[in-house]
Amino acid sequence: MWVDLIIALVKILFIFAITVGFFAPVLTWVERKQSALMQDRIGANRADIMGFTVLGLFHIIADALKMFTKEDFIPDGANKILHTMSPIIALVPALITFAVIPFGGQYTLFDKEVNLVISDLDVGLLFVFAIASLATYGYVIAGWSSNNNWSLLGSMRTASQMISYEVSMGLTIIGILMVYGSMKLTEIGAIQENFWMWGIFLQPFGFIMFLTASIAENKRIPFDAPEAESELVAGYFTEYSGLKFGMFFMAEFIEMVTIGAIMTILFLGAWHIPFLTSATLLSWFDFLGTTGANIVLMLIHVGVFFGKVVFFIWLQMIIRWTLPRFRYDQIMKLGWKIILPLSLANIMITGLVILALK
Amino acid sequence: MAYYVNRNTTMTWWERSYIPEIIKGMWLTSRRFFYNLFGFIPFFLGTEKDRRIMTVYYPEEQVQYPIAYRGRPVLAQNEDGQPACVACGLCEIACPAYCIHIEPAHNTGKQNQYERWPGVFNIDYAICIFCGNCEEACPEEAIFMSDDCDISMLDRKKMLYTKEQLLTPVADLQKRIEFTRNMYAKWNY
């Protein structure tokens, strides 16, 4: 029992370390550097300690210091409690979704089955979307409580955009559920050990629609109407400063990681390497003993999983720095008139194909 | 209500389906990304002098400006160590920003002294607009635009340069002198 508790704690600490400690800060740097390289620039490189810049990595420290030391400003007429609460409401769901996201398979370590997921829920996929949609409240309350026209407009746009795209997002994953016959994320991951069972082959249109809908959910360019700089100052977080602004910022980057992880599990074969089953890998490292081989396998799988996540983050960054912003009516049109019917058609075709193959 | 602008563009079905065009755009940007990313590797290894990125780290790295570049105006100092200027005041008149101040001095009877020379020659770079009119107006080839643009400072008073600070040996300005001769000869002054 104690062992289970310790294993669970280790997994939680690992997830926290990798999201809050690694991905969220490093992505701020990656965003600057990648956009710079795409536009033939050099990017952030001025923060230095004793003359060393380390490719501008010290900007992370500078950013963090700035956010911690800035004045925490609450405007006149703002609802203080809600104004303070909303960044937390926005950030926490992004972190909670990682509770059901498996970042590796099952391994036998010291005669003990270790499942690399914090909580292996039977309705994992549903849980992810249920929790992720809670974040909408954070954004809506943020805009409403800060007593600012632009914030309110931004939060209204957030609400409508997120609700519209949640519909098409939910319908898109139904195709995946029909194909795999399970909502358990670990099971969906395990099925994809066979390369030709990867979601991207079984649901190619679902992949594109899900990617679009999830970028819209994350409110990044080209769907960044809620925080459109040129129209609404900064949208729902106009009146936020210091660490509260930092929490919104962090929520955005952690959601990027979440999207990457979910896309990896549903469409890109989770933690599996193409044409290399776990059994083959285990037989390669057989000379290390059962535990040793399992540890090596675990490290490979976790590495592969996060490699795929990094690929998806890269893809989102490329999309963000390539496309211009949609107009608001275009966003709504794309959501309701294009993706929604297409996802319904996708469900129907998937159903027919499954019926025909039976 | 959405307002539709007629842009007189007819898109094919392929273009209107959006996805292929997005992929085309992403292909372009990601190609630039990897091209520039791998351009750093030979630079850091030292096998190549330049990165593929054109941007330079400005204060540390500097590029050679083209000869037509107009930096701060300087006074040409001839081989005797004296300004070539004869204090005629034409540049002072030509200056649209009134940043040049000249007080002429004449021969005091000393041997080897010039007939007429500027006793005081000040240019206030805080006022100067780098138009190059002074260079164009000068009949004696005495004032030239250098390629130095690094003259920002914290104290505005320090930007008033006196004659001693402005003097630059004529050998350093040779390229610019040739350039101005070619340039202004065309216009037949």
Image: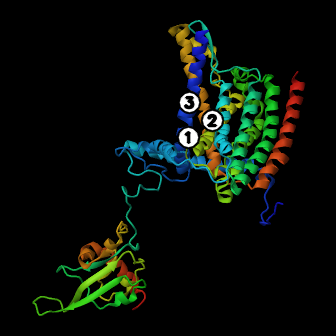
- Identify the residue at horizontal 62%, vertical 21% (top origin): A104
The residue nearer to you, when weighing A314 against A23, is: A23
Chain of the residue under the numbered disc 3 shown in the image: A
Tags 1 and 3 in contact by the CB under 8 Å rule? no
Q: Which residue is mark 2?
A: A257
Residue A265 sits above or below residue B78 on the image: above
> By what rule are the colours in the image chosen?
rainbow
- Identify the residue at horizontal 27%, vertical 76% (top origin): B166
The residue nearer to you, when weighing A184 against B124, is: B124
For disc 3, the neighbor class at 10 Å (few under 14, some 14 to 19, many from 20) is: some
Tags 3 and 2 in contact by the CB under 8 Å rule? no
Q: Which residue is mark 1?
A: A27
Q: Residue furthest left?
A: B111
Assign a secondary structure to mark 1: helix
Q: Is residue A48 visible?
A: yes
- Amino acid type, residue under disc 2 in the picture: Val
Q: Name which of mark 1 and mark 3 comes first in the sequence.
A: 3
State the image coordinates of residue B168 (x, y, percent, origin top left).
26, 74
